[in-house]
Image (spheres, rainbow, N blue to C red):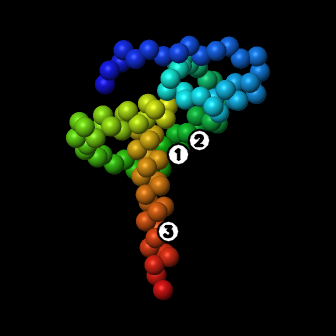
Amino acid sequence: MNSSKKFNPVPQFKTLQEEADFWDTHDSMEYELEDTDEMVELSNNQKSQIRKRWEKCKRATIQLNPEQLNAVEIIAKRKQVDYRELIHEWVNLHIADEFESSTTSIS
């Protein structure tokens, strides 16, 4: 993928509404967006809830060929999400579709 693409600078906005109106009519892929890594303080209760949620999850490993993984990463970048989150979202959507189609086809 060619990373030498020139991006437009994001304009300065006076209000949130002005910014929302701008993004409603402009493609974010044409603008240079800043990564914001902000530290968030979590309470002990929040940390405990996150740990419990992770402990309930089962892990699954999938193998993708390099072209598949590259395609997923490109799509994720366009959507401005982590590629693992995108894969998780797709799995959830397809599971829901499968359950929906299997329940509607039962007579």
Residue denoted by label 3: 100
Marks 3, 2: nearer the viewer: 3
Image x and y of residue 11, in percent: 64, 15
Identify residue type, mark 1.
Arg
Q: Name the foreground residue: 21 vs 42.
A: 21
Image x and y of residue 40, in percent: 61, 23
Number of numbered discs overlaid on the protein picture: 3
Residue denoted by label 2: 49
Kindly tell me whether residue 45 is visible in this rendering: yes
Residue at the location (58% across, 34% down)? 47
Secondary element at image label 1: helix
Q: Name the foreground residue: 80 vs 50.
A: 80
Kindly tell me whether residue 55 is visible in this rendering: no
Q: In the rendered view, tell whether residue 94 sits above or below residue 34.
A: below
Identify residue type, mark 3.
Glu
Disc 1 and disc 2 in contact, CB within 8 angstroms: yes
Q: Which mark is residue 53?
A: 1
Of labels 1 and 3, earlier in sequence is 1
Give how far apart the Cα atoms at labels 1 and 3 are.
Answer: 26 Å
Give how far apart the Cα atoms at labels 3 and 2 are.
Answer: 30 Å
